[in-house]
């Protein structure tokens, strides 16, 4: 359902962030996109949702290729949860924030409410409905950011570091939430334990190109491969080093 | 930095109060806005020498605070911050108008002193009224109402967005400030020559943040419309409150309770 | 410096609200025409930046005192005049509500004094012409200092005029001006230097941020410095003159209209003592025009009799008692419930 062909991208300052990426992603897959800082994960996401303009190669979502003319439809199919929820939650009430997308689709207020309520219920956060985003904890904000994307009924969701800055419990909460979502997911992350938990396929980016692509077992347990691109075995696979 | 922590606390405590659920909280925001404005106009319309007529206006803040269950301490604290400016404005009256107005027993009271008192009382009343408004009505609710009195949408959008990001920015500033002070322990604040870089950095980061927000909006179908507003209609009970309170306030303006009570003495 | 509700009269507050509302409506109209949708979130974030930025205290060398930034000119240079004015309006409203900085009736005055001059007058007619020829660090600094000083001074003059026109303080005009203007010249100098520093930094890091707001508006051609001064002068005269005229002829709109409507000039007055007191007051006032309007017919002096004051005390106690009673009843209800 998502096809990337011969994708290259350089930022205006000339920095080559994506080099010749070819990928094919099937409906319902749960994919971990890993790689060191600066490997190009966020850059790839920006290309998929059309924030950065594609100059070389192509990206297709369900046969619709990403480009200026298709942006509206692409963004209806592809949702993205930003790394910093403060960037994503810009309304003064949780309800209004989740309703922002549906309202822009010009649904009636009843339809909007159904969407919002569904999203809240699906994530089990109905109690946060009337709160103000700026008075919520980081974990709560993260889940609401996910709800705001869910309310748009996307076919694919891109997550940029969904577990960063969270305490262990909030992290677990977000992981469970992610696991409960059945649509296609691409999760950019440094949290390999999470990848081990909820993903079935891992793609390693290194200096802007695909370095490895395979099942969780094949990749996340291969110490050699991981260390070649500044990564480590998931913590739960490492020998405990208690002093 | 204490001012930053202070203002975060102020905003937080007022927001917490606004989350209450009393008759006053449940009133339609427009009704509260109108009565507050009316109260303000009536209070400041008293001439500077009439402090007895003014006193009856104490009923309004006191009753509202009780009905809304607003704790008085944080409000009083806020009031103290607001008073000094009026105090100095009023002080000049004591100095410049020493005309004798009356004697309380052996103590002479000048017109300047009376008008000084009047300024202070008015300050207390007006500040209380505004604080009560915001302590019983959240800012987004108030700003939505502005739409129904034809305030341009772009202003309301700005109020909402600014309000949303104040706490984020306050935190950011306070972190940057701490980082600065830790590396310049001897200095009492940011050095003036460093302000360009300090605020400049803050601005650059904020430009990037605004860019991300814009992208996040775009991802959810934004095309220039931030607000889809629909201020809720005014209910019967709200009308009743409005008419009743406005009526009483106007009566209070003409009826000097203090003099009435005083006439029995 | 923010005007407070208690320091304006209903007439002055109303006029300034109307004036600012006009400026806001015009700015909103201008923005509708040529505002990039991208600017909506940018303005919001910048509003929050100014809000937070004003809380940064910096030390002023050689004085031991500290200052903080204002924001009007800074915002205008980054966003353009009209968006800047709207942004500042939002900030002032939030400050008025949460911090009792100024108030709701004085909001119009504050928007005018702190926003209008900086964003809509000084920026387009002084700042822009200076940097128009060439956007260089020197020109940016000079423009910032001159503009901030000018904007602050205009604001300070307005504060004086509005306060005096409101008839709240008895400070003579000359003394008041003499206090306010030098202070604001000094503050303006410091704030202008800092504003310049910030803008120069931005210019060095991301020049496109400044330039984009520079050229989104066409400037009138051949704008000479005389014209600039002329504009300022006319504005000052119109605003100042208009207000004081209103102040002296119809000092207190509401009080005056009440008299007309109710015909109750002597509603609660009992006469002579008050009249003579008022006369003495009139004749000894430093500035009779701006003196207190004790001839309005309200029972001012008569009101402040000893019994009246005791009555006032009792009124206060009654009010407090009522509040306490409501608290008590509510608490009992909660207990039984
Ligand atoms: N706006 C930009 N302009 C120029 N270069 C950029 C820009 N954004 C990112 N880059 C560069 O592109 C490369 C890829 O960055 P990207 O943000 O995609 O990495 P990432 O894999 O998401 O890293 P992280 O794990 O730190 O989030 C980096 O070398 C970065 O310096
Ligand atoms: Mg990234």
Image: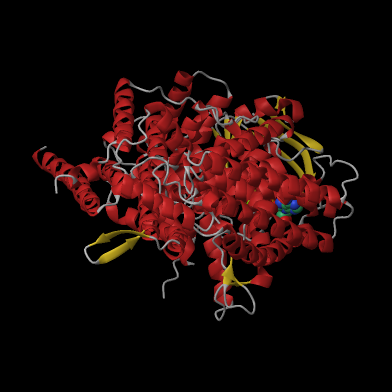
Using the image, determine if residue A203 lies above or below residue C179: above
- Residue A225 spot, x, y in % from top left: 64, 57
Q: Is residue B102 visible?
A: yes
Front in this rendered view, residue C85 or A212: C85
The image quarter in which residue C142 lies? bottom right
Q: Position of residue C62 (x, y in %)?
A: 64, 80
Nearer to me, B56 or C333:
B56
Residue located 67% across and 26% down the image? A72
Q: Residue at x 37, y 44 (%)?
A: B129
Q: How is the image coloured?
A: secondary structure
Look at the picture and state if A122 lies above or below C58.
Answer: above
Q: Quadrant of the N terminus of chain C?
A: bottom right
Q: Position of residue B150 (x, y in %)?
A: 55, 27
Query: Residue lying farthest left?
Result: C336
Closest to the observer: A86 or B43? B43
**Left or right, residue C253 beside residue C207:** left
Q: Residue at x 37, y 28 (%)?
A: C262
Front residue of this view, candidates C195 and B149? B149
Residue A177: give x, y in percent of width and height. Answer: 44, 40
Compared with C116, A75 (above or below) is above
Q: Quadrant of the C terminus of chain C?
A: top left
The number of numbered discs placed on residues in the rendered structure image is: 0
Mark yes or no: residue A185 visible: no
């Amino acid at each position: 359902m998502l096809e990337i062909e011969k994708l290259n991208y350089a930022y205006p300052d000339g920095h080559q962030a994506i080099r010749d990426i070819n990928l094919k992603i099937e409906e319902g897959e749960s994919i971990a996109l890993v790689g060191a800082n600066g490997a190009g994960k966020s850059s790839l996401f920006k290309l998929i949702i059309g924030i950065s303009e594609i100059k070389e190669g192509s990206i297709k979502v369900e046969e619709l290729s990403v480009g200026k003319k298709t942006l509206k439809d692409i963004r209806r199919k592809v949702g993205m949860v930003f790394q910093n929820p403060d960037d994503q939650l810009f309304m003064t009430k949780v309800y209004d924030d989740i309703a922002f997308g549906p309202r822009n689709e010009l649904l009636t207020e009843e339809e909007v409410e159904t969407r919002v309520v569904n999203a809240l219920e699906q994530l089990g956060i109905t109690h946060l409905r009337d709160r103000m985003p700026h008075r919520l904890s980081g974990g709560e904000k993260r889940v609401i950011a996910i709800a705001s994307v869910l309310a748009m009924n996307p076919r694919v969701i891109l997550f940029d570091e969904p577990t960063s800055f969270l305490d262990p419990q909030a992290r677990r909460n977000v992981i469970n939430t992610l696991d409960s979502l059945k649509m296609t997911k691409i999760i950019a992350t440094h949290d390999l334990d999470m990848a081990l938990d909820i993903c079935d396929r891992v793609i390693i980016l290194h200096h802007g190109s695909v370095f490895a692509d395979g099942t969780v077992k094949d990749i996340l347990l291969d110490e050699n491969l991981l260390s070649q691109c500044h990564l480590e075995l998931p913590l739960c696979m490492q020998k405990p080093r208690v002093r | 930095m204490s001012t930053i922590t202070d203002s975060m606390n102020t905003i937080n405590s007022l927001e917490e109060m606004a989350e209450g659920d009393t008759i006053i909280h449940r009133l339609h925001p427009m009704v509260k806005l109108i009565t507050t404005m009316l109260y303000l106009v009536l209070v400041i319309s008293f001439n500077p020498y009439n402090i007895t007529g003014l006193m009856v206006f104490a009923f309004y803040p006191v009753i509202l605070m009780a009905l809304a269950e607003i704790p008085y301490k944080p409000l009083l604290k806020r009031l103290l911050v607001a008073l000094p400016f009026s105090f100095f404005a009023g002080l000049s009256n004591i100095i410049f108008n020493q005309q004798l107005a009356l004697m309380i027993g052996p103590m002479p009271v000048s017109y300047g002193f009376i008008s000084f008192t009047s300024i202070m009382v008015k300050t207390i009343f007006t500040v209380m009224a505004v604080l009560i408004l915001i302590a019983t009505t959240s800012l987004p609710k108030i700003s939505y109402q502005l739409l129904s009195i034809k305030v341009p949408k772009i202003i309301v959008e700005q109020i909402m967005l600014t309000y949303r990001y104040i706490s984020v920015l306050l935190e950011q500033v306070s972190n940057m400030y701490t980082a600065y002070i830790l590396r310049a322990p001897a200095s009492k604040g940011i050095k003036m020559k460093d302000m360009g870089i300090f605020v400049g950095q803050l601005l650059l980061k904020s430009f990037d943040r605004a860019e991300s927000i814009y992208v996040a909006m775009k991802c959810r179908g934004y095309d220039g419309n931030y607000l889809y507003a629909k201020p809720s209609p005014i209910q019967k009970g709200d009308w009743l409150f409005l008419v009743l309170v406005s009526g009483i306030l106007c009566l209070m303006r003409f009826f000097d309770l203090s003099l009435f009570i005083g006439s029995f003495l | 410096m923010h005007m407070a509700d208690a320091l304006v009269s209903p007439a002055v507050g109303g006029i300034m609200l109307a004036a600012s509302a006009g400026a806001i409506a015009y700015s909103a109209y201008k923005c509708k025409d040529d505002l990039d949708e991208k600017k909506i979130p940018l303005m919001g974030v910048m509003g929050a930046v100014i809000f937070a930025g004003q809380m940064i205290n910096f030390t002023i060398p050689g004085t031991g005192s500290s200052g903080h930034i204002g924001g009007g000119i800074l915002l205008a240079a980054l966003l353009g005049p009209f968006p800047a004015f709207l942004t500042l309006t939002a900030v002032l409203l939030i400050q008025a509500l949460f911090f009792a900085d100024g108030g709701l009736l004085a909001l119009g005055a504050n928007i005018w004094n702190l926003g209008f001059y900086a964003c809509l007058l000084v920026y387009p007619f002084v700042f822009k012409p200076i940097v128009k020829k060439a956007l260089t660090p020197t020109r940016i600094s000079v423009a910032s200092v001159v503009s901030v000083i000018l904007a602050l001074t205009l604001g300070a003059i307005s504060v004086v005029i509005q306060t005096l026109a409101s008839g709240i303080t008895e400070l003579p005009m000359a003394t008041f001006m003499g206090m306010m203007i030098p202070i604001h010249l000094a503050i303006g100098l410091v704030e202008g230097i800092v504003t310049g520093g910030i803008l120069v930094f931005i210019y060095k890091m991301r020049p496109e941020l400044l330039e984009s707001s520079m050229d989104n508006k066409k400037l009138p051609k051949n704008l000479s410095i005389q014209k600039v001064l002329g504009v300022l002068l006319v504005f000052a005269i119109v605003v100042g003159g208009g207000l004081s005229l209103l102040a002296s002829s119809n000092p207190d709109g509401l009080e005056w209209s009440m008299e007309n409507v109710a015909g109750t000039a002597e509603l609660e007055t009992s006469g002579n003592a008050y009249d003579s007191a008022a006369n003495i007051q009139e004749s000894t006032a430093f500035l009779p025009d701006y003196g207190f309007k004790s001839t309005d017919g309200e029972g001012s002096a008569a009101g402040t009799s000893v019994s009246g004051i005791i009555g006032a005390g009792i009124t206060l106690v009654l009010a407090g008692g009522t509040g306490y009673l409501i608290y008590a009843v509510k608490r009992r209800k909660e207990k039984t419930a």
